[in-house]
Amino acid sequence: MFKKVLVPVDLQDAEFCLNPLKIALREVRDSGCELHMITVVPGYNNSIVSSFFNAKDHKAALKLVAQALMDFAHEHVDEQIKPVLKVFEGSAPEEINRYVRNNGMDLVVMRAHQRSKINEFLLGSVSARVVERAYCSVFVLKS
């Protein structure tokens, strides 16, 4: 049914992504579809980020994030499955939806944090923003 499945990975809370990954892996095993895993970090244009990192340190940090994503995939994805791994900078919901649109994803599997109303107001919900602007089906697991 699905040809391309995406699992966004929050490397700061990697355990949070394990259940969505298990569901995506089941779909990949059952139907032979492609698995895509992405992570999004704050962009260098973000004033907080650019005040702490020079361009060289920024590039090194992105390499570390890419390695962490590869390590996560190596630890949790079967050897015979070769996921597409990508690191992006910017707003998580915007980058996830851009990836979905640009790469023809059929399904996004992600988990929703259960936040307080004040946290929700201040931080927003990545999963809610992905769902409301999605170009494909989104499977959201409650935590």
Image (tube, grey):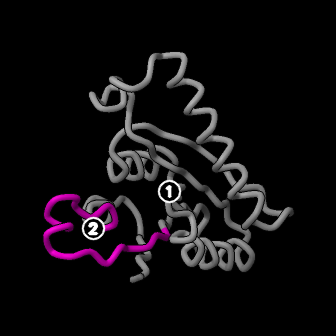
Q: Residue placed at 34% from the left, 53% from the top?
A: 93
Specify the farthest residue to the bottom. Answer: 142
Instruction: Classify mark 1: helix, strand or loop.
Output: helix
Vertical comparison of 80 with 139: above or below: above
Residue 82 picture quarter: bottom right
* Highlighted magenta segment, given as a residue range: 109-128
Q: Is residue 49 magenta?
A: no
Q: Is residue 114 magenta?
A: yes
- For the N terminus, the image quarter is bottom right
Residue 80 picture quarter: bottom right
- For the C terminus, the image quarter is bottom left
* Horizontal side, residue 118 vs residue 67: left or right: left
Q: Amino acid at mark 2?
A: Ala
Specify the farthest residue to the front. Answer: 52
Q: Residue placed at 43% from the left, 37% from the top?
A: 89
Q: Which residue is mark 2?
A: 128
Q: Which mark sits nearer the N-terminus, 1 or 2?
A: 1
> Which numbered disc covers residue 12?
1
Specify the farthest residue to the right. Answer: 80
* Horizontal side, residue 78 vs residue 133: left or right: right
Instruction: Classify mark 2: helix, strand or loop.
Output: helix
Circle 2 packing at 10 Å, graded few (<14), some (14-19), many (20+), is: few
> Of residues 3 and 29, which is closer to you in this image?
29
Residues marked 1 and 2 touching at CB (< 8 Å): no
